[in-house]
Amino acid sequence: MVGIWGCSAVLGGAGLPGSRVDLQPAPARSLRPNHVQRDDGPVTTEARGAADAPRRAQAQTGAQAGAHAEQEQPQEGLNNRLNWLRAGVLGANDGVVSTAGIVMGVAGATTDRAAILIAGVAGLVAGAISMAAGEYVSVSTQRDAELALLAKERRELEEMPEEELHELEDYLMSKGLTRDVAVEVACQLTERDALRAHAKLELGIDVDDITNPWNAALASMLSFTIGALLPLLTMTLLPQSSRIWATVVAVVLALALTGWTSARLGYARPVRALARNVLGGLLAMGVTYLIGDLVGAHVS
Ligand SMILES: [Zn+2]
């Protein structure tokens, strides 16, 4: 009932039971939300007819808003999936580059397959855990901030519902709605789920979609591991004569794929992104191989 009271109060008492309603039914009704209209006293047929036009207009506005919300939801779902995909591609890219660098570095120093395997596995595990921990920390921080903002908003909605309703109206008017429509929309949103509306419009937080830090951590750990396995397997499974060049080719192909995919996901030009990504990987492998070769020559 708080919502009804809040919306009625905003309308300068027009919606309060027993106020001007009986004298001037049509104008008062045109401003008032539908839910108040249902249960007030008897009205004449003419008054009802006059009141119907704005009511129909309101119903249409509501239907349009509803249709828009339905179009919007899959779009948000898609954005969300794209974000996950983007994070996965970047995680895999990291796994490819860092593990390729490690196995190349060791291969530059020694031909011992066991040494390459141990270094590569250690690098894979360290990288995967580091990615997961970093992701966990950053998503947790973001989640804490979002939950604190939601708690503050919930408190404000309980303590000063009217100010909050005005805030919503002002926001809607700032987006180009007329005062009447803004009042109506703010009322309906407040009635339905005030916190959800304030979270979404004011804070940009979707209450159904607070990211879980464990999911984020697991996802980046997995994608890093998948990326890391490629250079690790080519370097340790193939014969010594071909493993270095086979790894270079596999890494170049993988980085071309991740560079192209992340460019497409970010609407950037694929060819440039692909070239930058591949060059970065080649540089990592070249530098680590040379350093491994230098260090290996001095140690042995
Ligand atoms: Zn608010």
Image (cartoon, rainbow, N blue to C red):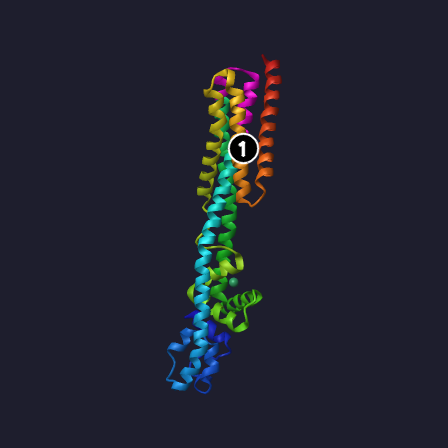
Front residue of 278/177: it is 278
Q: Which residues are magenta?
A: 96-117
- Which residue is painted at 45% across and 35% down in the image? 222
Residue located 51% across and 27% down the image: 250
What's the amino acid at mark 1?
A: Leu
Q: Which of the pair 160/42 is nearer the observer?
A: 42
Viewer-closest of 237 and 165:
237
Residues 99 and 211: in front is 99
Where residue 163 appears, as percent x and y from the top left, is 53, 68
Query: Majority secondary structure of the magenta segment?
Result: helix
Q: Is residue 101 part of the magenta span, yes or no?
A: yes
Asked if residue 189 lies in the magenta stretch, the reply is no
Task: Classify mark 1: residues with Cα within 10 Å, few (<14), some (14-19) or many (20+).
Answer: many
Q: Residue at x 53, y 60 (%)?
A: 202
Q: Determine whether 7 is above or below 238 in the image.
A: below
Res. 263 in view: yes
Q: Residue 60: percent from the left, percent from the top?
A: 44, 70
Secondary structure beneath dot 1 equals: helix
User: What residue does disc 1 label?
Assistant: 255
Rendering coords of residue 247 (x, y %): 52, 24
Q: Quadrant of the N terminus?
A: bottom left
* Residue displayed at 49% across by 66% down: 159
Q: Is residue 38 above or below residue 154?
A: below
Asked whether the viewer can see residue 195, the reply is: no
The x, y position of residue 59, in whole percent, is 43, 71
Please, is residue 184 above or below residue 151 in the view? Answer: below
